[in-house]
Image (cartoon, rainbow, N blue to C red):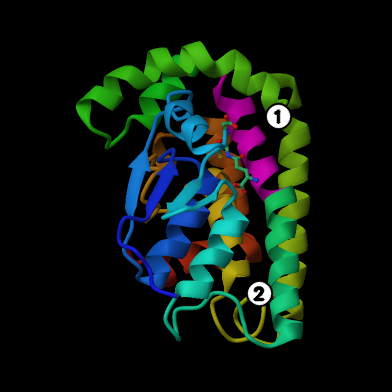
Amino acid sequence: MGYKSEVRLITMPFSHYSEKARWALDFSGLPYQEDAWLPMLHLLATVPAGGRSVPVLIDGGTVLPDSTDILMHVDRLAPAGRRLLPEGPAERAAVLDLEEYCDRHVGTASRSWIYSEMLSEPWAMGRRLGNGRPPLQKAILPPLMTLVSPGIIRSYRAQPERRDEWARKLRLAFDEIGRRLAASSGPYLVGDRFTAADLTFAALAAPALLPPGHPGMRTPVETAPERVRSLVEELRATPAGRHALRMYTEHRGR
Ligand SMILES: N[C@@H](CCC(=O)N[C@@H](CS)C(=O)NCC(=O)O)C(=O)O
């Protein structure tokens, strides 16, 4: 099966599920074009493609509106040595199980937690998200985040009074990943090499770790509000947090 260079990945630059798909593509070395949209405007690209959320991968006639399907598609096309899913059935099942765990528990909690902390001041959040972005995006993001914040808060149950609940869920998920790391036979979540499990955890934990080296999230932890900084620093110091930061340092080339 050949790979066409007109492969298009529709994203929001700072979306963590988009980062999961983008990292898988970057790791594979396969050529693609990122089509990055700001929140809500992304619907102009995803709805015509037949989806709603980002990421969406369009590869010829194949349209994949889900990060796990994208990762599996990319993995089938990736050259040997650039695969993220092990061949062995037991290891492969362990990786897919962890990927699903992270999709359900890490990605949801990190997103709702950061929004519950930041969206009571959506203008300020828009300014932070604009950090390091082109001037037009920098100008649009504060009013745009102000406009979309009520919908985001509703969709992700990110009301400010829920922030402790989301922080608790995040800590539980990090504890679970820490246990899986301790049980692994090697320095990765499954064995002795980087897999989709490590990538998915690191990408989906990013809103709660603000990892240096993240291509779409350029908010240094030093500039974050005190309460955010405090939990980011706490989670960064856990075994799971240290693991995610190491994955960004060692495996997040572009
Ligand atoms: N299960 C999906 C979840 C993707 C997702 O939640 N994307 C969010 C951004 S991180 C989104 O597009 N939200 C806006 C919307 O649904 O309109 C996947 O893994 O791709």
Image quadrant where residue 152 sits:
top right
Residue type at numbered disc 2: Leu
Q: Which residues are magenta?
A: 105-121
Compared with 190, 104 (above or below) is: above
Q: Of circles 1 and 2, which is in front?
A: 2
From the top left corner, tell me how far across and down residue 3 is, in percent.
38, 68
- Front residue (pair 104, 10): 10
Among the two numbered marks 1 and 2 on one chain, the one whose residue lies closer to the N terminus: 1
Could you classify mark 2 by the number of other residues whose Cα lies within 10 Å: few (under 14), some (14-19), or many (20 or more)? many
- Residue that label 1 marks: 163
Residue 131 in view in this figure:
yes
Q: Is residue 180 left or right of residue 39?
A: right
From the top left corner, tell me how far across and down residue 85 is, in percent.
60, 76
- Residue that label 2 marks: 189
Compared with 211, 229 (above or below) is: above
Q: Secondary structure at mark 2?
A: loop
From the top left corner, tell me how far across and down residue 146 is, in percent.
48, 13
Instruction: Tell me how far mark 1 sits from mark 2, CA to CA.
Output: 28 Å
Identified at 74% across, 20% down, the residue is: 161
Q: Secondary structure at mark 1?
A: helix
Identified at 45% across, 85% down, the residue is: 81
